[in-house]
């Protein structure tokens, strides 16, 4: 093949023979992960064969879209494959690792939940694959950022995101709660775009060397300053988005980076409860951390983590409130599906769309509606309806339900089927829309937003739609102000 592509062109979309060959190299990694997961579930200590079967069928359904993408049978950005893959640790593995809540349900309940989850994923896969099994024709034009200016713009966004974290941690921002929420949402949305786009170009070697070095420094700085707030999930989500972008761009797994960051986040995870107890719950005033205090802050945090790791079989196991939870236990949401299946339609009736009916209200900006409901209102409705919380409790603590359990709580199995069709269509159509567009185009950037949201396994529909809407408005602003219409290179493309 003699054709060459523009440096900013999204080769994921036009997948020539060499691209498909490179992607298939990921199949080796896929099979290692798939075999490892299935072997672990088959050899799990649980005595229930039905629980093992449930976990295995969920895992098979969850990883099959990744197989289609890695093998080159599915085109475009792997939004749905990554979304489906999260169900391995949120729904599959909790059935066989003696999760303290999941294990209280019967093996028959596990199997029913497994079939419902696998059915939802299978329906979503079929609908998604219909849209991505072949690329669409090339458009004549697209709106995109200029490659040089686009890179500088996103590097500036990363720098501003670090500055925002420093200001938030240090208490430098004296803003109204509504304005602060808007700024925070805008910064988060732009940071997702910046980290993905720059890491993708770092992966496919189209980002200049000096910009690559600056970006890596800014990415590390962002994760470090973000985690200071004692919420490591933000740094973990940023790393997952960046890792996905690198894998898509390079067609290789950054094993060393994954190991280093995973170890660091795991260590911090051990001691975050002690830090929160000391600085969140014992102070009447919020604790601010200035940049010069970061070293001491992390030193204290790591100290608590090491103490807990040394004493994990001693004093910390004596208190249920301080009980150590594994990653699977913390990320699991299948217990919410099990609860909804056990309680509905009898003795607790379905909600029949009550958590979905509030979504239009969530799209109205707070400055136009000062009495606007919280984005987590749907989660609160579910928790109160199923007796997990009183209404007043929901203002301080939120219980993650996830899209699948929410759909069952509203319409039962019919809701799960409908959710599979809707998400399969959404991810499939957006993926197809972005196939023939460069990475700096509005199509690809919107796909990046969807990909980032695919990792948010605890989101209810209201949170998902409102957050995506807010991030989408930011992207619209970028499109109107910074993007220009550009012609699509019309050159022949070959497929294997």
Image: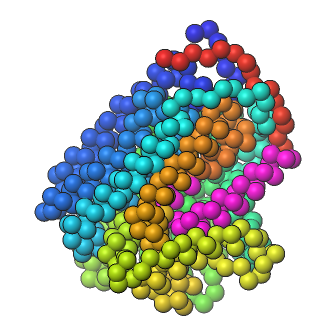
User: Is 421 in front, or is 199?
Assistant: 421
Residue drawn at x 57%, y 55% is: 453
**Quadrant showing the N terminus:** top right
Rendered image quadrant of residue 484? top right
User: Is 59 in front, or is 294?
Assistant: 59
* Lateral position of residue 68 relative to residue 108, left or right: right
Is 233 within the magenta?
no
User: Is 245 in front, or is 345?
Assistant: 345
Task: Specify whether residue 260 is in view.
Answer: no
Task: Specify whether residue 36 is in view.
Answer: yes
Label count reads 0
Residue at far right of view: 481
Question: At which x and y percent is residue 145?
Answer: 78, 38
* Lateral position of residue 100 relative to residue 478, left or right: left
Rendered image quadrant of residue 151? top right
Is 463 within the magenta?
yes
Residue drawn at x 37%, y 68% is: 337
Residue at far left of view: 47
Question: At which x and y percent is residue 401?
Answer: 46, 70
Residue drawn at x 71%, y 79% is: 372
User: Is 33 in front, or is 420?
Assistant: 420
Residue drawn at x 15%, y 58% is: 49
Question: At which x and y percent is residue 191?
Answer: 67, 53
User: Which residues, given as a range, are shown in magenta?
Assistant: 453-481
* Lateral position of residue 449 relative to residue 167, left or right: left
In the rendered view, would you say 95 is above or below 25?
below
């Amino acid at each position: 093949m003699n054709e060459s592509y523009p440096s900013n062109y999204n080769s994921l979309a036009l997948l020539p023979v060499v691209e498909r060959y490179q992607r298939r190299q990921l199949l080796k990694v896929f099979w290692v992960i798939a075999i490892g997961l299935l072997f672990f579930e088959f050899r799990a200590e649980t005595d229930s064969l039905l629980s093992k079967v449930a976990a295995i069928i969920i895992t098979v359904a969850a990883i099959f879209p990744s197989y289609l993408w890695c093998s080159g049978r599915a085109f475009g950005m792997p939004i749905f494959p990554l979304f489906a893959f999260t169900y391995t640790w949120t729904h599959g593995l909790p059935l066989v690792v003696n999760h303290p809540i999941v294990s209280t349900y019967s093996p028959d309940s596990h199997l029913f939940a497994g079939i419902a989850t696998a059915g939802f994923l299978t329906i979503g896969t079929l609908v998604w694959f219909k849209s991505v099994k072949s690329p669409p024709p090339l458009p004549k034009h697209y709106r995109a950022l200029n490659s040089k200016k686009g890179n500088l713009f996103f590097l500036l966004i990363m720098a501003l995101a670090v500055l925002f974290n420093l200001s938030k941690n240090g208490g430098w921002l004296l803003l109204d709660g509504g304005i602060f929420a808007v700024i925070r949402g805008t910064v988060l949305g732009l940071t997702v775009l910046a980290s993905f786009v720059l890491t993708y170009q770092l992966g496919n070697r189209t980002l200049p060397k000096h910009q690559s070095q600056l970006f890596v420094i800014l990415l590390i700085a962002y994760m470090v300053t973000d985690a200071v707030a004692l919420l490591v999930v933000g740094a973990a989500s940023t790393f997952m988005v960046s890792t996905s972008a690198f894998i898509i761009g390079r067609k290789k797994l950054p094993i060393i980076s994954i190991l280093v960051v995973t170890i660091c986040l795991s260590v911090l995870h051990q001691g975050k409860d002690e830090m929160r107890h000391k600085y969140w719950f014992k102070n009447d005033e919020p604790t601010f951390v200035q940049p010069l205090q970061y070293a001491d802050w992390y030193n204290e945090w790591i100290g608590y983590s090491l103490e807990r790791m040394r004493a994990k079989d001693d004093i910390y196991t004596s208190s249920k409130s301080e009980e150590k939870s594994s990653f699977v236990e913390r990320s699991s949401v299948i217990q919410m599906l099990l609860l909804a299946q056990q309680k509905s339609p009898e003795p607790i009736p379905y909600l029949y769309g009550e958590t979905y009916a509030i979504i239009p209200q969530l799209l109205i900006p707070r400055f136009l509606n000062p009495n606007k409901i919280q984005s987590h209102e749907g989660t609160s409705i579910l928790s109160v309806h199923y007796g997990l919380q009183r209404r007043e409790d929901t203002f301080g603590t939120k219980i993650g339900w996830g899209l699948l359990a929410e759909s069952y709580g509203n319409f039962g199995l019919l809701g799960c089927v409908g959710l599979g069709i809707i998400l399969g269509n959404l991810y499939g159509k957006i993926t197809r829309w972005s196939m023939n567009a460069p990475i700096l185009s509005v199509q690809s950037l919107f796909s990046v937003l969807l990909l980032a949201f695919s990792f948010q396994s605890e989101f209810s529909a209201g949170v998902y739609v409102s957050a995506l809407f807010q991030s989408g408005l930011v992207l619209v602003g970028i499109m109107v102000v910074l993007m220009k219409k550009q012609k699509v290179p019309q050159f022949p493309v070959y497929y294997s």
